[in-house]
Image (cartoon, rainbow, N blue to C red):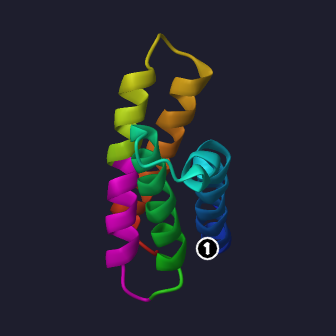
């Protein structure tokens, strides 16, 4: 069976939107509370900024913004997966999924 190459662009945008929705669901409240005494605020800020960079990078012809944002998301997702590891759970799988999508954008850029 042959892959549908014509849907690659759509799949890339769906992954970008999914990353943004995950970040919004997990971190937007912490980000909007703007409590600089809470270390979670800085993690939330990093995820929000990198997610926006990944989304905006899709509109640019150069790959650098997409790759840098995805690399940051990959590192943060790996840290979150490590910190949340308590066996194979749904939370761990979500971080692993976010990390794998980030790794896709690190290796492919805006293709």
Give the percent coordinates (x, y) of residue 22.
63, 48
**What residue sits 41% from the left and 55% below the top?**
46
Q: Is residue 40 above or below residue 6?
A: above
Give the percent coordinates (x, y) of residue 32.
60, 55
Nearer to the camera, 32 or 82: 32
Residue 61 appears in view? yes
Q: Which residue carries the number 1 mark?
A: 9
**What residue sits 57% from the left and 46% below the top?**
30
Which residues are drawn in magenta? 61-74
Give the percent coordinates (x, y) of residue 72.
34, 55
Could you classify mark 1 by the number of other residues whose Cα lies within 10 Å: few (under 14), some (14-19), or many (20 or more)? few
**What residue sits 31% from the left and 77% below the top?**
64
Say if the magenta span includes residue 82: no
* Direction from residue 63 to residue 15 in the image, left or right: right
Nearer to the camera, 3 or 72: 72
Give the percent coordinates (x, y) of residue 28.
62, 52
Magenta stretch, main secondary structure, is: helix
Residue 103 appears in view? no
Find numbered disc 1 in the image and state the secondary structure of the residue it sits on: helix
Q: Residue pushed farthest top?
A: 87
Q: Is residue 79 above or below residue 63?
A: above
Tell me how many marks there are: 1
Say if the magenta span includes residue 65: yes
* Direction from residue 70 to residue 27 in the image, left or right: right
Nearer to the camera, 18 or 110: 18
Tell me which corner region of the image, top left, top right, bottom left or bottom right, holds residue 100. Answer: top left
**What residue sits 43% from the left and 61% below the top?**
105
Q: Is residue 54 above or below residue 38?
A: below
């Amino acid at each position: 069976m042959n892959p549908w190459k014509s849907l690659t662009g759509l799949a890339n945008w769906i992954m970008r939107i999914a990353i943004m929705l995950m970040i919004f669901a997990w971190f937007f409240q912490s980000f909007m509370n703007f409590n600089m005494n809470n270390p979670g605020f800085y993690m939330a800020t990093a995820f929000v900024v990198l997610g926006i960079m990944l989304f905006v990078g899709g509109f640019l012809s150069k790959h650098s913004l997409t790759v840098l944002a995805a690399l940051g998301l990959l590192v943060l997702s790996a840290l979150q997966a490590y910190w949340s590891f308590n066996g194979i759970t749904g939370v761990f799988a979500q971080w692993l999924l976010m990390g794998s999508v980030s790794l896709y954008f690190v290796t492919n850029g805006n293709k």
